[in-house]
Amino acid sequence: MQVALDDLDLNEAARPSVPPYANVTDEQRQAGRHLTAIHRMHLREISKARMILRHVTDGTSDPTAFIEALRDMEMAQNYRLFGNICGQECRMLQFHHDAEEHHMFPALEANGTDEIRCMVAKLRGEHLVVHELIDRLVEAAHSLSSYPDDRGFIQAATIFDKLEAVVRSHFGYEETGLKDALGVHVGYI
């Protein structure tokens, strides 16, 4: 049974914190800056989609324009190659999370403090929420592409809103908590 959209939550109140690191060099901080730069790239793509969605919801475009515009955007120009409506951007976000899951997080777990290990466990759980929302957006967008109606558009827009809020919150938490830890415990990103 699928979890209700409203129940897909990051439980931000349960996020463990990481104490500040002392004596972190500028070179070590570069890994955290790099993570932030990668996140900004993803957020720019989400903002582009948000602008298109805004045009549809304010009545200056019809719901089918949402799909057409997504196909023309950088984040979705590889739609046919990847087989989903968010195209390259969803693949890039998945790749980003896979790199964290298989390289960055294991290094943090092996070399970090107990607080870092708790934070990594929380971030892994949050990735599952992000991936579920991406899957739901892909499914809703496919449906909307085949049967463009108001109900389908509302469903896709609602999922998009949730995905955007979750990704922004997740990225902020990750950047804040790992900004120094990456350079100290991993050395790169």
Image (spheres, rainbow, N blue to C red):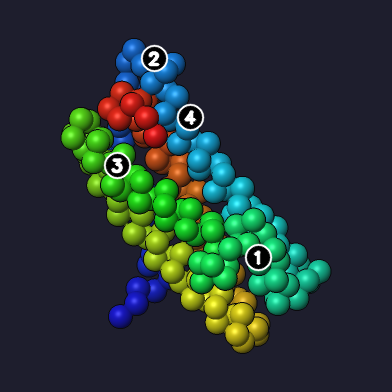
x, y percent for residue 179: 40, 30
Task: Return the disc, 1 or 2, that comes first in the chain's sequence.
Answer: 2
Looking at numbered disc 2 in the image, what kind of residue is underneath it?
Thr
Left or right: where 97 falls relative to 16: right
- Point 61% across, 87% down: residue: 147
Q: Which mark is residue 25?
A: 2
Image x and y of residue 149, in percent: 65, 85
Q: Would you say residue 33 is visible in this rendering?
A: yes
Q: Which residue is mark 3?
A: 103
The quadrant in which residue 183 appears is: top left
Residue at 66% x, 67% y: name it: 71
Crowding at dot 1, Cα within 10 Å, few <14 / some 14-19 / many 20+, comes out as many
* Image quarter (top left, top right, bottom left or bottom right) of the C terminus: top left
* Residue type highlighted by circle 3: His
> Residue pushed farthest right?
60
Q: Residue at x 48, y 29 (%)?
A: 33
From the top left corner, tell me how far across and down residue 131 is, in percent.
40, 61
The amino acid type of the residue labelled 1 equals: Leu
Q: Is residue 33 positioned above or below 106 on the image?
A: above
Q: Nearer the viewer, residue 184 or 4?
A: 184
Marks 1/2: CA–CA distance: 41 Å
Mark 2 vs 3, N-terminal side: 2
Q: CA distance from mark 2 to mark 4?
A: 13 Å
Viewer-nearest of discs 2 and 3: 3
Image depth: mark 3 or mark 1 in front: 3
- Report helix, strand or loop for mark 4: helix
Label 3 vs 1, first from the N-terminus: 1
The residue under label 4 is which amino acid type? Arg
Residue 70 disc label: 1
For residue 33, which numbered disc appears in the image?
4
What is the C-alpha distance between the residues marked 2 and 3?
22 Å
